[in-house]
RNA sequence: GCUCAAGUGGCGGAAUUGGUAGACGCGCUGGAUUCAAAAUCCAGUUCUUUCGGGAGUGUGGGUUCGAUUCCCACCUUGAGUACCA
C-alpha cells in the first residue's frame, strides 16, 4: 500500500472537523495551557509558504501539550480591518467587507489544508460588529478613566470629578496635559459644563486634542510613529509631513514606567524587550528654569546632566519653540525668521537625513544662569527637537558633542568644567571617573555626587527639580479611513459624547465612495446615514441633524491596532454577547502561555496590547496585567528569486555562466519556472510574459541557468511559493516537517523547495516501516517484548524530542525521527510497544500520517487523546563506552572502558594500552595520569 | 554613531554545565535495480597528503591536559534605532 498523502490528509481534516477534536472547554480537571498565534490580516494574495511557519511551531507545541495532559486553548481569527481592502475598494468600488470575506475564505481553506489544531468555534474577526462592539466598549472605558499617580493605576474619571468639586486640582497627582490650568473647587463648580468637559479631556486616558501629527498626503491619513520607517510610510513608502489636526489620542505615556517594569516579569526575547525599552526611552535628570533678561518668560529645559550646569555657555531652542518670536530682538529678527521659515520647509525626512550640517541663529536675547547669574546667549537650532523634552536645551559644549559642534561652528565659548580633561578636539561625555571643576559648589565632586547635589540645590532654590523623562509619545488613535472601527462618539456643541454601552455596536455606515470628501473630511463624511438621535438612541440620516436631539457622529475610524490590543482575551469567551469575556473564562485562562509571532510588532501591537491589558487590569476587568507570559519571534522565510540576464539594449538573454562576457541587466522571473538545478525551461518562460515571447536565449551547455538572490517573498520579485502547491505534491505533513527542518525557529532563512524531498522520503519510509509490520496490510504488530536495541532507539527518541519541543528546537527533532525510523527499519521492528509510542512522538509534527497509522494499529480514539510516552533512563544505560584518551591534547585514541571501573583500574587499563601503542610505534611509553571528568582525561 | 544578534563543508544546519567537530537533510560522485527513466536501495563526500599523517569552526591573542563552546581585541554580516539633551 502506497503512502497517499492527499487521501489521508483530507480524511483526517474532515474527521477532526466532524469530531470537534480540538474544541477547548472553559473548565476542566486538567491544567490549562493557552497557545496563541498573532492573527493574520487576510490579504488578497493568500498565504505563501513563509506565513505558516509560526503557526506550525505553535501547532506542534499545542498538540504536544495536549499529549502532556493539558486542556489547550489554541484559537485563530483574523485582523480583518486594514488598508489594502480599502484601497482595493477605492479602485474597484467593491465593498471592503466583501473583499475581506472572500480573502478570509481563501485563508481558511489554506489553513485547513495544513492540518492545524485550531479551535475554530472561537474564531474572531476584528471587522465583525459583534467583535468591534467590544473594541468600542474598551474605548469608552478608557474615555471614562484617568491615571492616578498616587495609587499608580487607572481609576474612573468620576473619582477625579469628586476631587475637583471638593478641592480643585492643585494637589491632584493625576496624569494630564502639560497645559492644564490650576483651579480651586470654587472655580471648578463655577465652570460651565463645556469648560468642565474641556478640562476633563486633559485627564482622560483617551482624549481629543490638537496634535501635531504625521500626515501622509498620499494615503490621506495620519500615521503613528511606529507606522513610519525612515521618514516615509511603512506601507507604500510615501512621504510624511507634520500637520496640526484634532485627533483622538491614547495616553499611553501614563503607563511608560509600568510598561518598562513589566518587561522584567515576562519571558520575551531580549532583543524585543530591548527595542521596547528603547522606544519608551526613559531618561533620568532634572528640569531647570532659566530666566530671560528683560522678560517675564522663562525657559525650562530638561537635562540628564544637571551636574554640568556650570558648563552652560548658551541655550538652544527648537525653531518651533513658542518663545522664539517673543524674545527675538529687533536686530536679529530678520535672520531668525528666515531660519525658522527655512526649517519649516524642510521635511522631517530631510532634517533626519542631514544631521551633519550645523545650522542655527542667534535670537539676540540672553538668559540668566540660575546659579552664577551670568548672561547666556539664546540661540535657535534645528538640532533641538520640538517634540522631545521641552523643545529647549541648556547647552554644555564641553560635555555634549552636539553642543560642542554648534559652539565651534558659531564661535561660542567652550568653558571647561572637568579636571584634567582635554577638550580641544571633542566634548568629553564620559561620566565615570570625571571630576567636576570650575563649578562653584560642585567643584571637586564626581558625577554621582555632583548630580545629586545639583538637583538638591535646584530644588532648594526653587529653580528646578529632578525629573524622569520618557521618549514614548501618546498614541494618535484617529485614522481618516473607512475600513476601521467607527468611534462610539457623537458631538454636542463640539464636545465629544460617548454612546451608552447598551447601544453598541455602532455599525460602520454604507458610503458611495471610499475616498475622503471634497472638503477634506474623512470617508465617513460621505455617509448619508451617520447622525445620532438621542431620543431613539439610533443612527439616523445626516439631513436630520438639528443639534438639539440629533447630532453628528465622529467621522474618523480607529487605527489597525485597536482590534488587536485585546483579542487574546476575547478568544477566552468569544461567543459571549453580554460581556467581552465572562469573569469565569478570564479567571480560568488568565493569560496567553505561549505567543508566537513576528518581531516587526515590537513597538506597535505588542506595546499597545500591553498598555490595554494593564488598563483593563487596573479596572478589574482582567485578572493579570501582562497578557502573554512567554513570547517567541519566529524568523521570516525568505524567497529565493530567480534572475535572468538580458544583454543591455537587446532582447537577448544569457545564461548565468556567460553573463560576465556581456554588459547585462538583471530581471527577476517566476521562481516556479526554475527546477532544482537552477535551470529554467525557456519555452515556459516565453509563455510566461510577452516580453520573453520573441526573446533569444544564449545557453550554456544546452541549459539556461538563472542567478539566485535571497530576498523577502513578494509578488513583485516573482519568488512566492504557494503552500497549496506544496500540499498538493508532497502533502501538509511534508510541509510542516520541512518548515521546521529548515533551521532554528527564530532565525530567518531562505525557502528552497528542492530540500523537501528529504522529509517526503522520510514519511514514505515511516509509512513503509509500519506497513511491513502489518501482515497483509492489516493488524500485524506483535505484543512481543521489544529488544534492548529497540527500546534504546525509542527512549533515546523520546528524550530528545521532549527536550527539543520544550526548547523550541523543532528543527533537530525532525533529524531524530529520521534516525529512529532508519534504526527501527534496520531492526525490522514490529512491536506494538515501540511503534505506538513512536507515533505519538511524531504526531505533533506530522499529524495526518500519525492519525492514519494510529488507526491502522487498531486504535479507535484520535491520537491526540494519547498520553506522551514516558522516558525511562534505564534503557539508555550502557555497560561500557568508548572514551577519548588524549596526551597533552596532542595524540588521541579511543578505548572501550567499563562504566564501573575505579580510577585506578582505568589508569591501569590505559597504561597497558599506551604501552602497546608505544611498542607498535617504537617509542617509550608516556606517563599516565587520570584527570577526573565526564570523559576520562589522561595527560602525559 | 548607539544597542542587539550571528560568523562552522558546495548549501541549510547539528554539537555549548569545555571532552571523538561537521549529526540530519540537500547537492554531488560511484554502484545495484531497470530496455530506459522515475522511484528505491547501498557506498562515499571538510581540506590536504609522499597514505604515516597534517590542518581545520571569521582574524589575532589568552585561560585550560583539552576551546566551535569561556575571556580580551579586531574584522565581517544581519536586525533595530537614530540629532532624545
Image (cartoon, coloured by chain):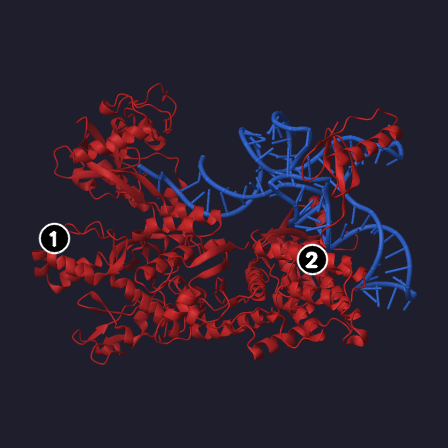
Relative to A259, is A450 above or below?
above
Q: Callout 2 environment at 10 Å: few (<14), some (14 to 19), or many (20+)? A: many
Would you place residue A343 above or below residue A802 in this image? above
The residue most toward the top is A420
Q: Position of residue B51 (x, y in %)?
A: 89, 35
Q: Which chain is red?
A: A
> Do labels 2 and 1 touch, CB within 8 Å?
no
**Mark 1 packing: few (<14 Cα in 10 Å), some, or many (20+)?**
some
Return the residue at label 2: A795
Alpha carbon distance from label 2 to label 1: 75 Å
| Between discs 2 and 1, the one toward the N terminus | 1
Q: Nearer the viewer, residue A782 or A666?
A: A782
Q: Colour of chain B?
A: blue
Judge if badges 2 and 1 mark residues of a common chain.
yes
Q: Indicate left or right for A352 with A362 as reference.
A: right
Q: Residue at x 56, y 73 (%)?
A: A109
- Horizontal relation, residue A200 to residue A216: left or right: left
- Tally the numbered discs: 2
Residue A429 visible within the image:
yes
Residue A477 seen in this snapshot: no
As helix, strand or loop, the secondary structure at mark 1 comes to: loop
The residue depicted at 30 percent of the width and 43 percent of the height is A469
Residue A512 location, x and y as percent? 36, 75
For mark 1, what is the residue?
A183
Residue at 25% x, 30% y: name it.
A453
- Residue A488: which quarter of the image? bottom left
The quadrant in which residue A303 appears is top left
Q: Quadrant of residue A675?
A: bottom right
In the image, A249 versus A882, the foreground residue is A882
Relative side of A586 to A795, left or right: left
Amino acid at each position: 500500500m502506497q503512502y497517499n498523502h492527499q487521501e489521508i490528509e483530507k480524511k483526517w481534516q474532515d474527521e477532526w472537523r466532524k469530531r470537534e477534536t480540538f474544541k477547548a472547554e472553559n473548565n476542566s480537571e486538567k491544567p490549562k495551557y493557552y497557545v496563541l498565534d498573532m492573527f493574520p490580516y487576510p490579504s488578497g494574495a493568500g498565504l505563501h509558504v513563509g506565513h505558516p511557519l509560526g503557526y506550525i511551531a505553535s501547532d506542534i507545541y499545542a498538540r504536544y501539550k495536549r499529549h502532556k495532559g493539558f486542556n489547550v486553548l489554541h484559537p485563530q481569527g483574523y485582523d480583518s480591518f486594514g488598508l489594502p481592502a480599502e484601497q482595493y475598494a477605492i479602485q474597484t468600488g467593491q465593498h471592503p467587507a466583501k473583499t475581506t470575506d472572500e480573502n478570509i475564505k481563501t485563508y481558511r481553506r489554506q489553513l485547513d489544508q495544513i492540518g492545524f489544531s485550531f479551535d475554530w468555534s472561537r474564531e474572531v474577526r476584528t471587522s465583525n460588529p459583534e467583535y468591534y462592539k467590544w473594541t468600542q466598549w474598551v474605548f469608552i472605558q478608557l474615555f471614562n478613566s484617568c491615571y492616578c499617580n498616587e495609587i499608580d493605576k487607572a481609576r474612573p474619571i468620576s473619582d477625579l470629578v469628586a476631587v475637583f468639586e471638593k478641592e480643585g486640582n492643585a494637589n491632584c497627582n493625576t496624569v494630564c496635559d502639560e497645559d492644564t490650568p490650576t483651579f480651586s473647587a470654587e472655580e471648578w463648580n463655577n465652570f460651565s459644563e463645556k469648560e468642565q468637559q474641556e478640562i476633563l479631556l486633559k485627564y482622560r486616558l483617551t482624549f481629543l486634542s490638537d496634535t501635531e501629527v504625521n500626515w501622509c498626503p498620499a494615503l490621506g491619513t495620519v500615521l503613528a510613529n511606529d507606522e513610519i520607517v525612515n521618514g516615509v510610510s511603512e506601507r507604500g513608502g510615501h512621504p510624511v509631513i507634520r500637520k496640526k489636526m484634532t485627533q483622538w489620542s491614547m495616553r499611553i505615556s501614563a503607563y511608560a514606567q509600568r510598561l518598562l517594569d513589566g518587561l522584567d516579569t515576562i519571558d520575551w526575547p531580549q532583543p524585543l524587550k530591548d527595542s521596547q525599552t528603547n522606544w519608551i526611552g526613559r531618561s533620568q535628570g532634572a528640569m531647570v528654569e532659566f530666566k530671560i533678561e528683560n522678560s517675564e518668560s522663562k525657559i525650562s529645559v530638561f537635562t540628564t546632566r544637571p551636574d554640568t550646569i556650570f558648563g552652560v555657555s548658551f541655550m538652544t531652542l527648537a525653531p518651533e519653540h513658542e518663545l522664539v518670536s517673543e524674545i527675538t530682538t529687533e536686530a536679529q529678527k530678520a535672520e531668525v525668521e528666515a531660519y525658522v521659515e527655512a526649517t519649516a520647509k524642510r521635511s522631517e525626512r530631510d532634517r533626519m537625513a542631514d544631521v551633519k550640517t550645523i545650522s542655527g541663529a542667534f535670537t539676540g536675547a540672553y538668559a540668566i544662569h540660575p546659579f552664577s547669574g551670568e548672561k547666556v546667549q539664546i540661540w535657535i537650532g534645528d538640532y533641538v527637537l520640538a517634540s522631545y523634552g521641552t523643545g529647549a536645551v541648556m547647552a554644555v559644549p564641553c560635555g555634549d558633542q552636539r553642543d560642542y559642534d554648534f559652539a565651534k561652528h558659531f564661535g561660542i565659548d567652550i568653558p571647561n568644567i572637568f579636571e584634567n580633561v582635554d577638550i580641544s578636539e571633542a566634548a568629553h561625555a564620559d561620566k565615570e571617573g570625571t571630576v567636576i571643576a570650575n563649578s562653584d559648589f560642585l567643584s571637586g565632586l564626581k558625577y554621582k555626587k555632583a548630580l545629586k547635589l545639583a538637583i538638591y540645590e535646584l530644588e532648594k532654590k526653587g529653580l528646578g527639580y529632578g525629573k524622569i523623562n520618557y521618549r514614548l509619545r501618546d498614541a494618535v488613535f484617529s485614522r481618516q479611513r473607512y475600513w476601521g472601527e467607527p468611534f462610539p462618539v457623537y458631538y454636542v456643541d463640539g464636545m465629544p459624547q460617548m454612546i451608552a454601552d447598551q447601544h453598541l455596536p455602532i455599525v460602520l455606515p454604507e458610503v458611495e465612495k471610499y475616498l475622503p470628501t471634497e472638503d477634506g473630511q474623512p470617508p465617513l463624511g460621505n455617509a448619508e446615514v451617520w447622525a445620532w438621535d438621542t431620543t431613539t438612541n439610533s443612527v439616523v440620516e445626516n439631513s436630520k441633524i438639528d443639534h438639539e436631539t440629533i447630532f453628528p457622529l465622529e467621522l474618523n475610524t480607529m487605527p489597525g491596532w485597536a482590534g488587536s490590543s485585546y483579542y487574546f482575551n476575547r478568544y477566552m469567551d468569544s461567543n459571549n454577547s453580554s460581556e467581552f469575556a465572562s469573569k469565569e473564562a478570564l479567571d480560568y485562562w488568565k493569560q496567553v502561555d505561549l505567543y508566537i509571532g513576528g518581531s516587526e510588532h515590537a513597538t506597535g501591537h505588542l506595546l499597545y496590547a500591553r498598555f490595554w491589558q494593564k488598563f483593563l487590569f487596573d479596572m478589574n476587568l482582567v485578572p493579570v496585567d501582562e497578557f502573554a507570559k512567554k513570547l517567541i519571534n519566529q524568523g521570516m522565510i525568505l524567497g529565493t528569486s530567480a534572475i535572468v540576464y538580458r544583454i543591455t539594449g537587446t532582447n537577448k538573454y544569457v545564461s548565468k555562466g556567460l553573463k560576465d562576457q556581456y554588459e547585462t541587466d538583471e530581471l527577476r522571473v517566476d521562481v516556479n519556472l526554475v527546477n532544482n538545478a537552477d535551470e529554467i525551461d525557456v519555452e515556459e518562460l516565453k509563455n510566461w510574459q510577452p516580453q520573453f515571447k520573441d526573446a533569444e536565449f544564449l545557453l550554456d551547455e544546452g541549459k539556461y541557468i538563472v542567478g539566485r538572490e535571497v530576498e523577502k517573498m513578494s509578488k513583485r520579485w516573482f519568488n512566492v511559493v504557494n503552500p497549496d502547491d506544496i500540499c498538493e505534491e508532497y502533502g501538509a505533513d511534508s510541509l510542516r516537517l520541512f518548515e521546521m527542518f529548515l533551521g532554528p525557529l527564530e532565525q530567518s532563512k531562505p525557502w528552497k523547495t528542492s530540500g523537501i524531498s528529504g522529509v517526503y522520503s522520510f514519511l514514505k519510509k515511516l509509512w513503509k516501516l509500519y506497513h511491513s509490520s502489518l501482515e497483509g496490510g492489516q493488524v500485524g504488530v506483535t505484543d512481543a517484548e521489544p529488544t534492548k536495541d529497540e527500546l534504546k532507539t525509542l527512549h533515546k527518541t523520546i528524550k530528545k524530542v521532549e527536550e527539543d519541543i520544550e526548547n523550541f528546537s523543532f528543527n533537530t527533532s525532525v533529524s531524530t525521527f529520521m534516525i529512529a525510523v532508519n534504526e527501527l527499519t534496520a531492526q525490522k521492528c514490529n512491536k506494538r510497544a515501540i511503534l505506538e509510542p513512536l507515533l505519538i512522538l511524531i504526531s505533533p509534527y506530522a499529524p495526518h500520517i500519525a492519525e492514519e497509522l494510529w488507526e491502522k494499529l487498531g486504535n479507535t480514539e484520535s491520537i491526540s487523546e494519547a498520553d506522551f510516552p514516558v522516558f525511562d533512563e534505564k534503557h539508555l544505560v550502557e555497560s561500557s563506552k568508548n572514551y577519548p584518551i588524549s596526551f597533552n591534547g596532542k595524540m588521541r585514541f579511543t578505548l572501550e572502558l567499563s562504566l564501573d571501573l575505579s580510577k585506578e583500574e582505568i589508569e591501569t587499563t590505559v597504561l597497558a594500552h599506551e604501552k602497546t601503542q608505544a611498542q607498535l610505534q617504537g617509542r617509550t611509553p608516556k606517563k599516565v595520569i587520570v584527570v577526573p571528568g565526564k570523559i576520562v582525561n589522561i595527560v602525559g
